[in-house]
Image (cartoon, rainbow, N blue to C red):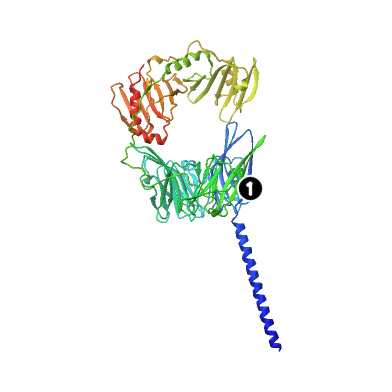
Amino acid sequence: MERKLLLPLVILITLLAACSNETKEAESKDTEDKEATKKVEDSIEELASYEISNEDMFDMYNFKSTYEGDKLIFSGNRTNKRDDIRKRYVITADKALISTEDLAKEDNERDHCIDGELSPDGNYFVFNCSNDNTVFSLYDFDKEEVIYREENENQTFDHYESSTLHAMAITNDQEIILGQKHEGYFKIYDLKDASIKEVDVASEISDDDRLVDIILTDDDSKIFISTEQQVFEYDRSTEKFHPLIDDTDEETRVSSFKMSENGKYATYHKKENRINGPLQEYDVFVNLESGEQKAYDKLDYSGYSTPDDNGNIVFYDAKEQAMFLYNFEIEENKIIPIDKDKLFMAANNFSFSSNGKHLFVYDIDYGDEKTTYTFYRFTFGDIDSYEEDEFRGNLLNASNNNVDENKDNDTDQPITLNDYDEDPREGYKKRWEKSVDAQFPTQFPFEPDEIQYSMYGNRYEQEIINGREEIEYSTFLNGNITNSKDCAADDLEKDIEKDGIEYYYYDFTMEHELAFAKDGDCYTIVQEDFDKETSYSIADSIQTINDPPFDLPIDQIKFPTKLPMNELNISTQHINYNTETTELRIFHTFESRDDKKFNIGYAASTEDTLKSQSEKHEEVESSDWEEITYYEDMHELVMYDGDFYYRLTADRIDNEYQEELGEENIKQILIDVAETMEK
């Protein structure tokens, strides 16, 4: 009987225990699901802030974050009354914002620490300081101190290298990559055993190419080297170079190379200026493991980030104040739901961590007296839930860049030349004759070797030169200015008042500037070699002149009589004259007011100084000119008639219209305009 009663009881207890376990498991799973849901929510976290006076300006650039997103480095340029203070800044894992000068200083002599790079693992930071007799310094974030300084007195490098080598990267194993950009090599300096290995890049590139940047993979096994024309992968185990870009030569320019830390994904901007072909510009996204490439032109974004380890790239639109997460392999574009109040859009002033989890941005708060820059870290949540957006770029075939080499780009519709009403000579004459209304200095602290005159608008300027000593003088003719403050730059301060004239002055680090109003006009004197009293002596000596300071044989100079636009403006006309070389130069632009912009730049000179330095040029046959040369890459035509040199430039042609016209048509238009020129 007892057994019969106990058996159901045991079964009941067992069932209750099982139910209890299932309930706990369900509750545990529910808790895990809730925690998982919490983990995928977007979040934004304030990191640090930086405050400056409203009298200063602060520009930031070159943002980089660590793989885990625990540190951020960037460069900052603080300007106070034209004096620039450039620093490299670090936001550490504990949210402290410090400058490289703060890291470097043992005394007051270490400053101008403007360079700095993190190791791939984020443990080390190598930086250069210009005024501390140090080639580089190495900071350890764990120890929170500089653990090594390569002093010049160590004589590890010769005097020239000590001043020209720059720390461009650092490995996780304390190997410093020191680059010599102009000489085309870099050195790997292993601090553990003080060994130095030199890697020659110059042997892999053309004579007119140069080293631009060095990027390491996270395992330190490969070094990627970008030049102006190519990107190389350098395998440290085999010591072999492998070029990454096909069809690159002296007509190609490669810029903005970026790479994920695992070395799998890369992006770069490519520009081609081929003979008899349109200018081609596009952005290339590459999977370095598979070799897959995709090229895009006409990207309708303000910029984009370094790719992460999964092929994601953050694009931003400064006008819309919006950011997008794009994966170029699956061509999926998502709108990042970031708070626009925590977002300030400028040229690449953000960073995307290579693990794809974090985005660093900042915001600006303009106060009455101070401006505050606040930095934030945005952490991605459930990306699949983000709203999709059409990618704003035209996909090309990266292997041939969608360019048909046999395509005739020339338009079938001829460009007609039209008469125009305004005579440029009248503007030049008026400007030159009005110079007698300006007052010029008559006393200088030296006997001038040469004086360079510039006349444009209502401004008349002199650059007075004696060897390396220079004085810049300018006057702005208005006739109605009574307050000297209206003539002074905002960063000048009132100095003295003499004979009813207020003088504004400031002694900047690199120059001294004096400004004042006299007889209704503005006057400014800028010099760096003499004291304040010298500036005042020059100011006291100014007086009007009886005749223009040089001759202007405007009636002997040829101008176009027909131009390839229906409506136009003549831009500000410039007259330059040098008393030493006696060169007279005039120049302006015929600005098109048509829908399709095609401006014509015009210049004339008494000396042979208008020719381009480009090697891409051809002589043009013409019965109207003694010499005529076309420079294709500059779209310039330079002519000589035996008396004067002339230059016509096809200016501000957008890429689409340039492709429609074709290079031959552009050249022919300039030749046709030249044939209409007459005195």
Residue 44 image offset from top left, x and y in percent: 61, 49
Quadrant location of the N terminus?
bottom right
Residue 319 vertical placement versus 523 (above, below) = below
Residue 671 vertical placement versus 19 (above, below) = above
Residue 421 image offset from top left, x and y in percent: 42, 18
Q: Amino acid at mark 1?
A: Glu
Foreground residue, 440 or 388? 388
Q: Name the residue located 63 percent from the left edge and 68 percent from the top edge.
A: 26
Residue occupying the far bottom of the picture? 1
- Horizontally, is 377 left or right of 630 in the view? right
Q: Name the residue located 47 percent from the left edge and 24 percent from the top edge.
A: 467
Foreground residue, 672 or 479? 672
Quadrant location of the C terminus?
top left
Give the residue at mark 1. 46
Residue 564 image offset from top left, x and y in percent: 38, 26
What is the secondary structure assignment of the residue under circle 1? strand
Please tell me how crowded label 1 is: few (under 14), some (14-19), or many (20+) other residues with Cα within 10 Å.
some
- Horizontally, is 418 left or right of 330 in the view? left
Foreground residue, 61 or 357? 357
Residue 672 vertical placement versus 200 (above, below) = above
- On the question of residue 197 being in view, the answer is no
